[in-house]
Image (spheres, rainbow, N blue to C red):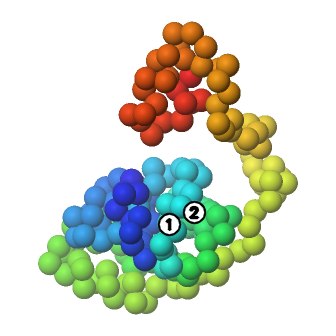
């Protein structure tokens, strides 16, 4: 959530969930939200090409631990060359809770948290072998490259004509539309 809001920014805050994204946007802050730790794979380097400082909000639970680990690894895997910081406030679950506790001081308290955020060194990029070894739910499709561009023979007949008509008006991949 919020990709269009960070494309021109030099910093951003990664958060888990749409409500945290909306809270940051409401305060005109560059937030990028994910539906969960498993959705971080959709993040691409071109999405954050201008970003040189990435913060992520670490929630105080197991899900927060997973999100933090996957944000750091994803940035590394993408070849992100900027700095990565972990952001949290004791007793506060997420940015939405921070806002709801005291809307008037939200910006000041968040700014202090940003100043006190912990620099996190990025690990080495994950190899495909490590993905297999460390995955409980490994699927061979994870290693199968997506067909790009889609072969013209796949667009045969009426279905192909429909895909050709829709493609200029959507961000969806033609192979996924099939």
Disc 2 and disc 1 in contact, CB within 8 angstroms: yes
Query: Label 2 crowding class (10 Å Cα cut-off): few <14, some 14-19, many 20+?
Result: some
Q: Is residue 117 above or below residue 163?
A: below
Q: Which residue is mark 2?
A: 45
127 sits to left or right of 44: right
Residue 98: % across, % down: 28, 72
Q: Secondary structure at mark 2?
A: helix
Q: Which residue is mark 1?
A: 48
Q: Residue at x 17, y 73 (%)?
A: 103
Residue 23: % across, % down: 27, 63
Indicate which disc residue 114 carries.
none
24 sits to left or right of 137: left
Q: Residue furthest top?
A: 157
The CA distance from mark 2 to mark 1 is 5 Å
Residue 35: % across, % down: 45, 50
Q: Residue at x 74, y 37 (%)?
A: 141
Residue 133: % across, % down: 83, 53
How many numbered markers are drawn? 2
Seen from the viewer's position, the closer of residues 1 and 63 is 1
Q: Is residue 60 visible?
A: no
53 sits to left or right of 146: left
Seen from the viewer's position, the closer of residues 14 and 90 is 14
Q: Secondary structure at mark 1?
A: helix
Q: Residue at x 51, y 10 (%)?
A: 158
Quarter of the figure with residue 113: bottom left
Q: Residue at x 43, y 34 (%)?
A: 168
Q: Is residue 174 above or below residue 126?
A: above
Work out which quarter of the rendered image holds the C terminus and state it.
top right
Q: Is residue 76 above or below residue 19?
A: below
Quarter of the figure with residue 121: bottom right
């Amino acid at each position: 959530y919020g990709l269009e809001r960070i494309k021109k920014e030099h910093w951003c805050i990664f958060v888990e969930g749409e409500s945290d994204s909306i809270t940051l946007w409401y305060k005109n802050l560059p937030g990028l939200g994910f539906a969960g730790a498993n959705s971080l794979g959709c993040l691409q380097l071109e999405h954050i090409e201008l970003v040189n400082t990435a913060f992520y909000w670490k929630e105080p639970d197991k899900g927060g631990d997973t999100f933090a680990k996957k944000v750091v690894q994803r940035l590394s895997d993408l070849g992100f060359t900027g700095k990565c910081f972990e952001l949290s406030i004791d007793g506060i679950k997420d940015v939405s809770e921070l806002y709801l506790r005291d809307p008037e001081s939200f910006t000041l308290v968040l700014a202090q948290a940003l100043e006190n955020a912990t620099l996190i060194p990025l690990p080495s990029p994950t190899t495909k072998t490590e993905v297999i070894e460390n995955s409980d739910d490994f699927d061979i499709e994870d290693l199968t490259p997506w067909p790009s561009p889609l072969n013209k023979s796949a667009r045969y007949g009426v279905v192909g004509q429909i895909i050709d008509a829709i493609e200029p008006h959507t961000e969806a991949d033609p192979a996924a539309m099939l």
